[in-house]
């Protein structure tokens, strides 16, 4: 590793309260290259975080040949730093790679790289509960070649960003617009891969929803605009009386690590959780009748996001009778999951990986 001269190190944020989301980056990054010629990764190194040169013809810039991941390192009260289920993220990275015809990584090696990088940047992991060091592994095709083809020259890198709460408004319910015109991912498409194009394609709908005062959109299935899929960067769960319902992994939604964790926790709490197709009409009818007690999103960035109101076809439907109140189960899940992530409670699942 190249040592960075002291005077070139960045100033760390003085106050955890000033951390936004994804705006500050640490001093170092991990990177490695792959070429189809050898079929192997090479030149793995931790180096200074700085802009890099790629050709204006690089295929990532033209055809979006790109995949990424998002996970976090947490500071515990006794000073440890730990990761939450990083193996799941690496596994998903490899699934995304397969879908985008990109090379796979060695899971053990990448977990080692993440640990080494976070250990090196440990001073950057914020201490306050709710803050963390966001880890962003990224893989891009950098072939200098105008033509649609699988990447033969690939750059993989990991950057780190100390982050505060995802929503400036804190842990409070958000209002969501059910999108009945645009779609996110179609059957057979790339919805299950964390690839840049999915997010580029979602922006217009999200902007239009924001103009109307909604935080994000809830996507419906591409074919019939009938079944609920997921929100921008979170999976959705609906608490219908005593049953928690979430969309099954049909291929057009992203298989969230938080979603998977919440399902396991609910099962252990003897709460009925169903991965089943759910129509927007069922959700709206349940909101009207009072059967829909709570709704929340799950995702690494915000962990659990309570939803207070759904707008469908220009009508607002309040969830659980009060759009500003966080539901009981939503709160309980948030408290439990974050207490495992921040080491306040014992982890009975083996989800935590310590950075020693
Ligand atoms: C990342 C992401 C999620 C949440 O996945 P986690 O692994 O829980 O962070 C959900 N939906 C989409 C579209 C995502 O990109």
Image: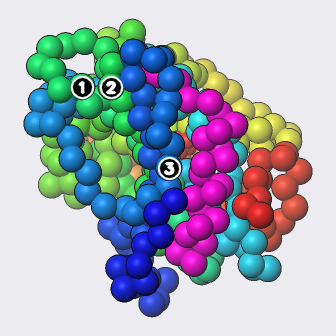
Secondary structure mostly seen in magenta is: helix
- Residue drawn where x is 76% and y is 34% of the image: 272
Residue 143 has which mark? 1
Marks 2/3: CA distance? 17 Å
Q: Is residue 5 magenta?
A: no
Of the numbered discs in the image, which one, if any, rests on residue 252? none
Image coordinates for residue 141, horizontal then vertical, percent: 30, 29
Q: Position of residue 18 (x, y in %)?
A: 40, 83
Image coordinates for residue 136, horizontal then vertical, percent: 46, 50
Determine whether the residue tagged by mark 2 lies in a helix, strand or loop.
strand
Earlier along the polypeptide chain: callout 3 or callout 1? 3
Look at the numbered disc 3 and say if its residue's Cβ is closer than 8 Å to ligand 1.
no
1 and 2 marks in contact (CB < 8 Å):
yes
Q: How many marks?
A: 3
Q: Give the range drawn in magenta.
A: 101-125
Q: Is residue 243 above or below residue 120?
A: above
Q: Earlier in the sequence, mark 1 or mark 2?
A: 1
The location of residue 298, given as percent across then percent down, is: 55, 47
């Amino acid at each position: 590793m190249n040592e960075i001269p002291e005077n070139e190190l960045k100033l760390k944020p003085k106050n955890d309260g000033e951390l936004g989301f994804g705006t500050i980056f640490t001093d170092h990054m991990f990177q490695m290259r792959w070429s189809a010629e050898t079929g192997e990764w090479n030149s793995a190194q931790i180096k200074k975080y700085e802009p890099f040169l790629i050709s204006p013809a690089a295929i990532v810039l033209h055809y979006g040949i790109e995949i990424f991941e998002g996970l976090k390192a947490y500071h515990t009260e006794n000073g440890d730093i730990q990761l939450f289920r990083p193996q799941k993220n690496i596994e998903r990275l490899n699934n995304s790679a397969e879908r985008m015809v990109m090379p796979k990584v060695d899971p053990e090696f990448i977990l080692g790289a993440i640990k080494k990088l976070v250990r090196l940047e440990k001073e950057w992991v914020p201490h306050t509960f709710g803050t963390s060091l966001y880890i962003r592994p990224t893989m891009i095709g950098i072939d200098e070649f105008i033509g649609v083809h699988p990447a033969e020259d690939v750059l993989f890198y990991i950057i780190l960003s100390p982050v505060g709460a995802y929503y400036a408004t804190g842990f409070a319910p958000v209002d969501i617009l059910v999108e009945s015109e645009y779609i996110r991912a179609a059957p057979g498409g790339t919805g299950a891969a964390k690839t840049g194009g999915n997010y580029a394609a979602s922006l217009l709908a999200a902007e239009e929803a924001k103009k109307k005062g909604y935080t994000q959109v809830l996507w419906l299935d591409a074919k019939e605009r009938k079944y609920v899929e997921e929100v921008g960067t979170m999976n959705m769960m609906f608490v219908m009386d005593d049953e928690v319902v979430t969309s099954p992994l049909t291929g057009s939604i992203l298989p969230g690590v938080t979603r998977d964790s919440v399902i396991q926790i609910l099962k252990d709490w003897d709460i009925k959780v169903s991965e089943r197709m759910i129509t927007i009409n069922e959700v709206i009818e349940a909101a009207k009748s009072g059967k829909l007690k709570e709704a929340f999103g799950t995702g690494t960035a915000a962990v659990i996001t309570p939803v207070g109101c759904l707008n469908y076809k220009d009508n607002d439907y309040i969830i659980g009778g009060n759009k500003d109140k966080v539901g009981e189960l939503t709160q309980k899940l948030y408290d439990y999951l974050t207490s495992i992530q921040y080491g306040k409670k014992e982890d009975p699942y083996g989800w935590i990986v310590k950075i020693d």
